[in-house]
């Protein structure tokens, strides 16, 4: 039914755009820089609005992709150039080496054979993983990855020798391909704002100070602690947990805008703590709580818990007490009183930084002052590169972008 549609980004908005376009009868090339599809949703423990694990929805989408011959998936790849005009684009796709080919059965023998480890990117560096690894238990494609750091040494040789299917390819050099497409959907997603950039929180110096995305992995069954909420510094169960809202957000020195989802994320994560550790106290330090529409009921439910305290404050300093606990300094903006509070685990609610702010689209595009992409003919932004949004809004946005791309292709 016409030329292909190129979708860049395999998170929820990109997957939704690819599926909607393909199921409407159009050829789609889906490009994702990670070794797997699913984006940051795959790294969540639970997500709104049903507070269910993400794998159920992801599995359905992966089955739809697998059964649709119109979708070509290219992982570990980035679009490095786009030339042409609406209806006639040529996009250069550079694919990094995976060192594992399509013969892989995910048997795991390569991982068993190596001893070398690398920081686990799926768990945001909270633990380490074998240098021959499956990205996560529901990864699509369901195929191992060999880290480039071991390819030329004896560890790479061990991985290759252990594979009975000749799936380990240490000679993999990656590839560069030119994709012809009539329209492009750019759904490259977002990155958590780096908490180490907020100097007065001393993030790197305090192992029991974590980000909200790391908290998701602590609570997840497939996470570094198998779902047990523990202090990364010593493995102890926290008894007094703090959540600090707007960590770097709504701040002209960092992210000047509100990411809209951080308040809900902390409310949700407070329930993780209370359900797993009934004796634990939780304090949420906030500027204001933004939980609109149907989320107001969830806010009221969390606020009714007597062990969850809300303090209207902007925390100005975090320091260690020398024994693993953290001392927070701030001002109660309701009473005007300055205070110090001690907590044994602190979670920073860092915001969404659009990946188009970090890496621009390789084409002539317009961005707002925060790096979010603006509307353009032929290249359509979708999801969190266009605005901060929840998962269901990103899905809707991906569907809308697919419709715009279809209209362009059908009109040619």
Image (spheres, helix red, strand yellow):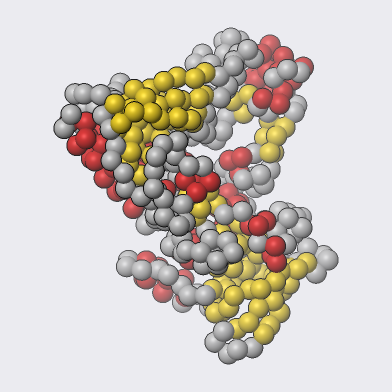
> In which quadrant will I find the C terminus?
top left
Observer-nearest residue: 381 or 59?
381
Left or right, 64 with respect to 218, comes to: left
Instruction: Note whether 217 is above or below 404 in the view shown.
Output: below
> Residue 4 lies in what quarter of the image?
top left
Q: Position of residue 178 (x, y in %)?
A: 41, 20
Observer-nearest residue: 51 or 211?
211
Left or right, 147 with respect to 174, comes to: right
The residue that appears at 33% across and 34% down in the rendered structure is 184
**Residue located farthest toward the right when viewing the structure as drawn:** 322
> Residue 196 lies in what quarter of the image?
bottom right
Residue 42 appears in view: no
The residue that appears at 16% across and 32% down in the rendered structure is 411
Q: Where is residue 168 in the image (x, y as percent from the top left)?
A: 61, 15
The residue that appears at 67% across and 85% down in the rendered structure is 338
Q: Where is residue 404 in the image (x, y as percent from the top left)?
A: 24, 41
The residue that appears at 80% across and 69% down in the rendered structure is 321
């Amino acid at each position: 039914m016409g030329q292909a549609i190129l979708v860049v980004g395999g998170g929820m908005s990109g997957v939704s755009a690819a599926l909607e376009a393909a199921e409407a009868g159009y050829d789609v090339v889906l490009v994702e820089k990670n070794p797997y599809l699913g984006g940051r949703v795959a790294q969540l423990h639970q997500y709104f609005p049903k507070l269910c694990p993400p794998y159920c929805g992801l599995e359905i989408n992966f089955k739809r992709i697998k059964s649709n011959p119109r979708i070509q998936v290219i992982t570990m790849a980035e679009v490095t150039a786009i030339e042409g005009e609406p209806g006639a684009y040529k996009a250069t796709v550079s694919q990094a080496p995976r060192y594992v080919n399509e013969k892989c059965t995910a048997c795991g023998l390569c991982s068993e054979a190596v001893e070398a480890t690398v920081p686990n990117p799926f768990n945001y560096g909270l633990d380490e993983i074998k240098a021959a690894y499956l990205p996560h238990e529901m990864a699509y494609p369901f195929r191992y990855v060999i880290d480039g750091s071991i390819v030329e040494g004896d560890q790479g040789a061990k991985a290759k020798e252990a594979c009975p299917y000749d799936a380990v390819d240490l000679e993999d050099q990656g590839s560069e391909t030119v994709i012809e497409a009539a329209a492009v959907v750019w759904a490259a997603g977002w990155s958590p704002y780096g908490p180490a950039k907020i100097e007065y929180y001393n993030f790197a110096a305090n192992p029991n100070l974590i980000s909200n995305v790391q908290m998701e992995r602590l609570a997840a069954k497939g996470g570094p602690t198998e779902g047990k909420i523990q202090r990364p510094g010593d493995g102890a169960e926290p008894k007094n947990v703090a959540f600090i809202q707007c960590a770097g957000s709504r701040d002209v020195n960092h992210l000047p805008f509100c990411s809209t989802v951080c308040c809900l994320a902390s409310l949700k994560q407070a329930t993780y703590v209370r359900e797993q550790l009934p004796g634990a106290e939780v304090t949420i330090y906030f500027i204001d709580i933004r939980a609109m529409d149907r989320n107001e009921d969830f806010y009221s439910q969390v606020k009714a818990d007597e062990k969850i305290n809300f303090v209207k404050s902007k925390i100005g300093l975090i320091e260690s007490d020398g024994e693993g606990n953290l001392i927070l300094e701030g001002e109660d903006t309701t009473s005007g009183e300055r205070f110090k509070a001690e907590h044994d685990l602190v979670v920073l609610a860092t915001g969404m930084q659009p990946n188009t702010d970090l890496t621009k689209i390789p084409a002539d595009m317009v961005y707002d002052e925060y790096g979010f992409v603006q509307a353009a003919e032929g290249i359509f932004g979708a999801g969190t590169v266009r605005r901060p949004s929840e998962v269901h809004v990103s899905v809707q946005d991906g569907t809308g972008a697919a419709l715009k791309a279809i209209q362009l292709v059908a009109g040619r």
